[in-house]
Amino acid sequence: MIDIEYECVQFSLQLQCQQQFTLPHARLEKSTMSFAKRIDSAIMKAIAEGQTPPSPAKLAEALHYAVTPGGARIRPTILMSIAAACGDQYPKLADAAATALELMHCASLVHDDLPCFDDADTRRGKPSVHKVYGEALAVLVGDSLIIMAFEALAKAAVDEPMRAVAMIKVLATRSGMPNGICAGQGWENESKIDLSAYHAAKTGALFMAATQMGAIAGGHDGEQWEELGARIGEAFQVADDLRDALYDEETLGKPVGQDDLHGRPNAVQQLGVDGAIQRMRDILGGAIASIPKCPGEAMLAAMVTAQAEVLTPIKWRAEQAAKIAGE
């Protein structure tokens, strides 16, 4: 499962976005600066509730281990950005949605790292959950995080039942079958892969959940935000392919060369490095064009523009700069 957060912590998406805000969006800038605090506070509250005694100590400890460090919290940050752009009418609902989305993402990473899938020893620069706590507890950690994700939304239904139910439906659709992250993992077990469906499910699904749930929390209809999420997800998949091809394990904080190891097609194999980078930027250009009308439309366009730089591998940018300097 895609996990670019480790490098993005070093080249923060949030800071890039903040630098591009203009005065008409001062209120949105102020909201964006508080996103990280809101997200982490809500996630830690959910984890703490899952650790309430009496509870099995090792599993309780492993829950916290699985969600920290949190990386750049890219998906919930996108969700919060869209909720703010749409007016942030239901902040408590946005907090619950961001929590649910990140818990689901973390669950997918825990399961993805298991020996039966990628058999990854590291994640986000530290040993993966199953390497520290064993396979059995890792499975339970992933399962627990999935249940906690839906629990967070169910609790939010007390104040806004219809919108909370709508978000539960979105998260379920983007997590399960036939087009969610479970389907994405399932495609890796097929002898013939539908590449478009595979990438849309494996990577795009939770980004579509981010944009749709953010819009719902902001008081808008989530359906029209699906294309933006799909395009952002596609761009992140290309970016992950680039990092897998260009970087080493120490830099990424996770195993590299997984696509070659497991015989999976990727953008670098098909287009080369320069072609893949151009493809990623073209996708993000289309993402900007797909942003629905909303009060914070300009802010979201700036956020997507910033992502183009964040996602372009630092190593490639350095090589291009050196090439230009030598000309």
Image (cartoon, grey):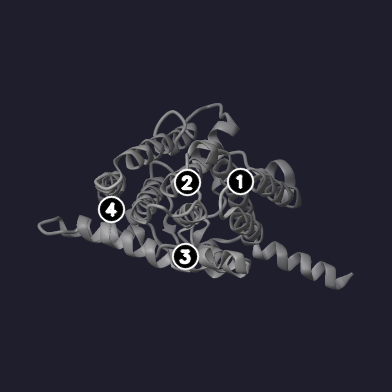
Q: Earlier in the sequence, mark 1 or mark 2?
A: 2
Separation (CA) of disc 4 from disc 1: 43 Å
Task: Identify the element where label 2 is drawn.
Answer: helix
Amino acid type at mark 4: Gly
Seen from this angle, which residue lies furthest left? Answer: 54
Q: In this rendering, which labeled residue sits more in front, label 4 or label 1? A: 1
Q: Earlier in the sequence, mark 3 or mark 4?
A: 3
- The residue singled out by tag 3 in the image is 31
The answer to whether marks 4 and 1 mark residues whose Cβ atoms lie closer than 8 Å is: no
Task: Identify the element where label 3 is drawn.
Answer: helix
The answer to whether marks 3 and 4 mark residues whose Cβ atoms lie closer than 8 Å is: no
Separation (CA) of disc 3 from disc 4: 40 Å
Observer-nearest of 154 and 252: 154
The answer to whether one can see residue 21 in this image is no
Q: Residues within 10 Å of mark 3 (few under 14, many from 20)?
A: some
Observer-nearest of 275 and 248: 275
- The residue singled out by tag 4 in the image is 134
- The residue singled out by tag 1 in the image is 291
Location of residue 15 in the rendering, given as x and y in whole percent from the top left corner: 56, 69
Separation (CA) of disc 3 from disc 1: 19 Å
Task: Identify the element where label 1 is drawn.
Answer: loop
Separation (CA) of disc 1 from disc 2: 11 Å
Q: In this rendering, which labeled residue sits more in front, label 2 or label 4? A: 2
Q: Which residue is located at x 61 percent, y 60 percent?
A: 247
Q: Which residue is located at x 56 percent, y 29 percent?
A: 193
- The residue singled out by tag 2 in the image is 215
Amino acid type at mark 1: Ile
Q: Earlier in the sequence, mark 3 or mark 1?
A: 3
